Amino acid sequence: MNIDFAQSAANTLGIEWEIALVDRDNGDLRSVAQEVLDGVRVAAGLPEGQEHPRVTQELLSNTVELVTGVHTRVADARQELSETLAEVRAVTDPLGVELYSAGSHPFAQPTQQPVTDKERYSKLIDRTQWWGRQMVIYGVHVHVGVDHHAKALPIVDGLINYQPHLLALSASSPFWGGDDTGYASQRSLMFQQLPTGGLPFHFDQWSEYEKYVADMMHTGVVDELNEIRWDVRPVPRFGTVEMRICDGLSSIREVASVAALTQCLVADMSAQLDAGRHIPVMSNWFRVENKWRAARYGLDAIIILDSAGNEKLVTEHLADELTRLTPIAKRLGCEEELADVWRIVTDGAGYQRQRAVAGAHAGDLQEVVLANTRRLRIED
């Protein structure tokens, strides 16, 4: 089968941010997404049946997704997210609902969360059963424009080399169903249990990717291309590569920082490919190990850097990479947002903040949720 890759301006970006709806008083999940979607639609003057272009439905009825348009600068995407967040709050505040963003909800029981009444979601749950009913998880996705389909798969491989960096920075799901899992990111390991979830395969040619998709469709594994849910994937209809690694992040500032890091990495890889260089492809067993280490240890992970098995503390390698990418950030106009990446290292990632709050409140996970919602409101 032929899969056309849309024309897209290099290094443009868009952001998708999954937000949970929680009770203002007790922090439990509230399944009021349809009320919120209807409210923002009416406030925007849109007719019934037309979805708000920037606030969309998700698998669970306790979740909405904020989506930006296409931007050249991270700052503009950040501003749009802030404006959309304000539109959502105008609806959720009167409902007694707060907005919560992390990789998972710390104490909600996953199997008790209602699924959005939509055929494709019902089909997913019917097929995946227990694993599908565990998907009380939230993430941040960043699309970056790629100007030729021949670059898309090498850039997918390249971003997987940086999966441990992005996952360690965003890791914010240490608790699951009321328990501390011992992991920094339970979400990343949970999501890969879905068919076609997890790490992408390596393909040398676009035609090999087309053959894979054809096989998946022929055998009924997927019905649509977007049901291939890799941690990083090409998105042919947009002409982008989509980074889907990150856990939910509890401030727009942090969302913007990982968007800037992603945009700079893609821009750098694109330039390398233009210059005739190749993006290194790490051995698959090292890619799997790196993901596990970042999910388990977060910012304390010692990661594998190359196929020779050289290793380094993820924050040490990240510091080197931020220095290397700074000239690219200046050219793209996201130097400030890229610098904020290091603030996560110094201030603590989400999993570290959650454990600190739980420890200060005798393990009270309601306080973990409410602290998150306050942070998101302060850093709108």
Image (spheres, rainbow, N blue to C red):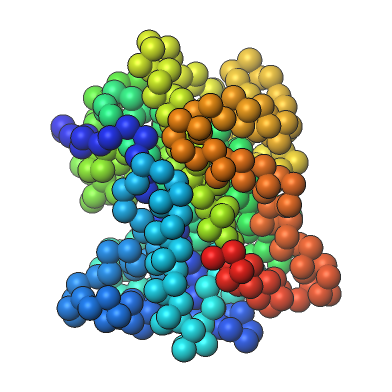
Image quadrant where residue 91 sits? bottom left
- In this rendered view, identify the residue nearer to me: 135 or 297: 297
Give the residue displayed 44% in from the left and 24% down from the top.
269
Question: Is there any visible trace of residue 186 in the rendered image?
Answer: yes
Can you say whether 15 is above or below 287 in the image?
A: below
Give the residue displayed 65% in from the left and 33% down from the top.
318
Can you say whether 201 is above or below 37 in the image?
A: above
Image quadrant where residue 2 sits? top left
- In this rendered view, identify the residue nearer to me: 12 or 243: 12
Image quadrant holding the C terminus, namely: bottom right
Question: Is there any visible trace of residue 297 in the rendered image?
Answer: no
Give the residue displayed 59% in from the left and 18% down from the top.
307
Q: Position of residue 361 (x, y in %)?
A: 81, 75
Can you say whether 48 is above or below 309 in the image?
A: below
Q: Position of residue 120 (x, y in %)?
A: 28, 63
Q: Position of residue 35 (x, y in %)?
A: 36, 83
Image quadrant where residue 274 sits? top left
Give the residue displayed 63% in from the left and 73% down from the top.
374
Q: How many marks?
A: 0
Can you say whether 217 is above or below 159 in the image?
A: below
Q: Position of residue 187 (x, y in %)?
A: 56, 55
- In this rendered view, identify the residue nearer to me: 133 or 2: 2
Image quadrant holding the N terminus, namely: top left
Relative placement, left or right, of 362 versus 67 is: right
| Farthest residue, direction top | 276
